[in-house]
Image (cartoon, grey):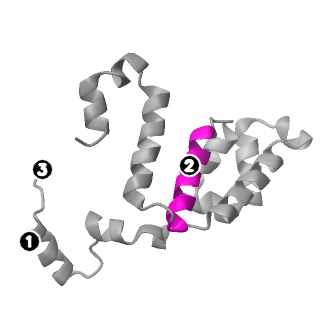
Amino acid sequence: MDLFTAKDIKKLKKENPNVIDYEDYMKSDAINIPDIDSLINEINKILEFINLDENIKLSRKELEQKTLMAFPVFATNYFTLLSLLLDNGDLNMLFGMLDMLKLVKTNNVDIKDAEKKYGAMLAKKFIPPEILNDPKVKEHLNGK
């Protein structure tokens, strides 16, 4: 696989203004982040819908079809998230990520710091303490 240099990207951007490089994307911070409160509100509506007595009795496939019909825009924009909701997945990490995005959107945290904080939260959840407490790992996680 060939890697693009900054010069290559500059040339590509000149030839095609739709080319986006990571640094440009990172500068845009909150521009592409949806309204988090509206998203959480929609998630709550879907959870209530899924947990209606009439829907609890449905098979996973029937529930998915019914939910797709009831929330077509959400299903189109956030299908993977909808699948998580339908599968009763762990929502703690999702809401942690949404909290971070809300901080970015309100300019309380920049996107790089939010990524680090969320990454640290993931590390605490999935990496055993004996590995996390290793001095070399700590040094790496702290960006040194």
Q: Amino acid at mark 1?
A: Lys
Tag 1 and tag 3, C-beta contact below 8 Å: no
Front label number (2 vs 1): 1
Residue nearest the viewer, comparing 21 with 98: 98
**In whole angstroms, how far apart are the C-alphas of marks 2 and 1?**
36 Å
SS for tag 2? helix
Residue located 78% across and 55% down the image = 45
Q: Is residue 92 visible?
A: yes
> Which mark, residue 7?
1
Residue 141 point in image, percent of width and height: 31, 37
Q: Is residue 103 above or below residue 54?
A: below
Real-space CA distance between mark 2 and mark 3, rounded to the nearest whole angstrom: 29 Å
Above or below, 90 against 73 in this view is: above
Q: Which mark is residue 1?
A: 3
In the image: residue 32, left or right of residue 131: right
Query: At 8% across and 71% down in the image, what residue appears?
Result: 7
Q: Tell me the magenta residue range.
A: 92-107
- Occupied quadrant, residue 86: top right
Q: Which residue is under mark 2? A: 80
Inspect the magenta stretch and tell me whether residue 100 lies in it: yes
Q: Disc 3 marks which amino acid?
A: Met
The question of residue 47 being in magenta is answered with no
